[in-house]
Structure formats: structure tokens, C-alpha cells
Amino acid sequence: MIRMLVVVQTAISLGVGEQVFLTGSSDELGRWNVSAVPMTRMDDKRWEAMVSLRTAEPVEFKVTRGSWETEQVNEQGGLMANHLLRPAEGGTVEIRVAGWKDERLAKAGPRITGDYRFLPQMHSKFLDHDRDVIVWFPPGYEARPTQRYPVLYMHDGRQVFDPSTSTWGKDWQVDELAQDMILNGELEPFIVVAADCTDARFDEYSPARKGDDYLRFLVEELKPMVDATWRTDPERSAVAGASMGGLISFYAAWKRPDVYFGAACLSPAFADRYGHECFQMVEAAKGKLPELKLFLSCGGTGELEAKLLDGTLKMANLLRGAGYPEKNLSVRIESWAEHNEEAWARMTPHWLRFLFGRPQIAEPDPGTKRKE
């Protein structure tokens, strides 16, 4: 067997749950099975795979994110010719990816349900990177000029509303689900503020790294701007996110219960590498627990989600052991769910209902009414 290293460098970092694949003309590369050879993320923009080939015959291959809709394109958005791999023991082939086919298709425009405002490249004095922010308004916002609304702050903004910008073309469907649930009376109306991630995502969402600086951006810069610009209820804010976004959501709410009344933490990264500070905060708070609504959820399919499930259950047990009120804690485990946007979208109605749900009054069955 001839072993070679294939390296893929992407122009921009890929979001949580993303994967890069190789596929090609040989059996070892899957005979054009679009997701035959998964690559390993080495850092935000570097992916590697060790390929073993039986012969020295050149092999054609392509780079994708798991489907032909997400194959590599050039800087002009055109499809790439097949790459050529010439087998050489111990050799390395490096590919630079300027973009992906679905990004080209996404240029047709955003696909967000309802009314929203796009705030490009918001600057923070606490962070090294600017970021886009989307502010979404509930149905009826313009028609009720005196009403004020609670605000939900979310991370990884490109994943929240728009399938054209989200991983695998799947978003969390917060816009359409919230709109439907507000209109049918399940939820009180609320505003959503979704701040996008940057190349420093893992640092900004990690409490041990730049998490405190990111929290200062949310509390000292983003929230005051939103409260001054739109009709918010400044005393009622919640926070939500997935994976590292779930971790920083828990950290933000627990550290600043004066700002946030609740947090939804989907597949939170309560792993030893990232979540140590959150466990310490809960341990230290026994006897003086904050008044927060906490929603924790996780799946169990796939190596990463299985690891995060252990941390989620550990946190749930720690909270309950500390006497956390059950009315303020919702833990939802779906062992079949994976670590991706599609699974988090299925969870969206549950945590929206937990944070913003209105009491539902049961209508009596007309057939059981007592005759006078």
C-alpha cells in the first residue's frame, strides 16, 4: 500500500458540525461516493486525511462537505476540475478551497421568515474580530408601537434563521417556528438577536479563554445598543446556543442572572477541555443558587455527541444535587440525535416553549358540558 497525506486548507473556517470529505476514482476513495473519506479537523481552516492506495496509478478526486451540493468551487464560484493524486509513498498533497457550491447558490439572497434587520460587521472593543448580527422581530411588532418585548440572544448567528448560510443547508428554524408558535398563542412575542461566530469561535465561547470578553461584548455593547434602538423589555433577556454556544450560554446566564432570566444549552460542551469553569460555578453556588430557567438537551449518536451527553448528564445531576428547583430546570435527552443543525432544529420548539411559553388553558369538551 502507498500511503499519502492529503491536506485541505479552507479560505474560511467551517462551523460546528461541519466535515470535509474526499471522494475519487479508486476503490480506496469510494468510487465517487460523495462522503467516502472523512477528513480530520486540525484547526479552524486545516483538514487532513491519510490515504492508502494499492497501486501507483494516478487517481482523480474531489473535495466536498458531504454532498454534491457542497463540492469545492473556485474563486469565481465555478466547479473545479478533478484533482489528480499521483501516488508516492510518504508524499503530501495540499488543496486550497476558495469556496463551496452551496455558498454560490446562497448568494441568491437570505431565506429568513418574518421581519428582520441585518447589522454588518459590528465592532467590539473587547474582541479581536467584528461580526454580523441579525435582529429578528415577532409578528405584530410594527402594529403595536407601545408594546415592549423580551429578547433572546443567540450565538452562531448564521445557523439560527437562514438555511442558505447554515451548515449543510439546515438552520435551527428559530424564525419560522417562533412565528408560528407566537401566532397560535403558544409563546409570548419576543425579539431574537443572533450574533454570528468568527474565526475565534472556540476562544470566544470558552469560559477559560476569551469567554469573559465575549460576555462583556454581549452585556456591555450589544444589549445596550439593542435596548436603545428597539422596543425591548430590558429586564427580560435570555440566551441560547449549541455545542460551544451552549456552553457559553450556560456560563453567561449563571454568571449574570441580573441580565438573563434563562438559557437554552443544546449539546453543551461540558467536557473537561472546556466546561470546567461551569462545574466549578455550580459547586460554589450551593445554598445560593441563581433564579434561572435552564434548558439542557443532548443527543447520543456519534462520538462527539456521546461525549457531550456524559457532560450534560453530569451537569444535570450536579444541579439537582445542589437543590436546583425542578420547575426551573428542563433536561431533554434524545439518544438518537446527532451533533448537527437538523437535530438542534427539532429541539427548537421545546426550548422556546420552556423559555417563552404561555400557559395553555384547556377547552372543555363540548360533549361533556352539563345541561341546564
Image (spheres, rainbow, N blue to C red):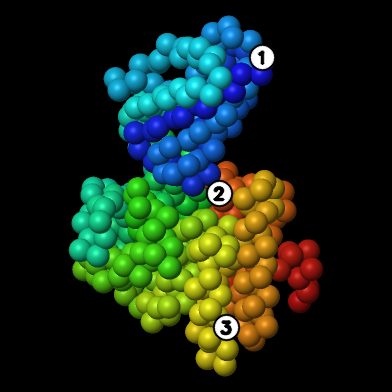
Q: Which residue is mark 3?
A: 283
**Residue type, numbered disc 3:** Glu
Mark 2 lies on residue = 345
Image point (21%, 68%), residue name: 228
| Secondary element at tag 3 | helix
Q: Nearer the viewer, residue 54 or 266?
A: 54
Which numbered tag is attached to residue 54? 1
Residue appearing at x 67%, y 63% in the figure: 310
- For marks 2 and 1, give the CA distance: 43 Å
Q: Quadrant of the C terminus?
A: bottom right
Q: Secondary structure at mark 1?
A: loop
Q: Residue at the far top: name it.
A: 57
Q: CA distance from mark 3 to mark 2?
A: 31 Å
Work out whether 351 lies above or below 58: below
Disc 3 crowd rating (10 Å Cα; few below 14, some 14-19, many 20+) is some
Across and down, in percent, residue 49 comes to 55, 31
Which amino acid type is shown beneath numbered disc 1?
A: Arg
SS label for mark 2: helix
| Mark 3 vs 2, N-terminal side | 3
Tell which of 218 and 303 is nearer to you: 303
Q: Residues within 10 Å of mark 2 (few under 14, many from 20)?
A: some
Figure check: 67 above or below 61: below
In the depicted structure, whether residue 93 falls above or below residue 361: above
Q: Quadrant of residue 124?
A: bottom left
Front: mark 3 or 1: 1
Q: Amino acid at mark 2?
A: Ala
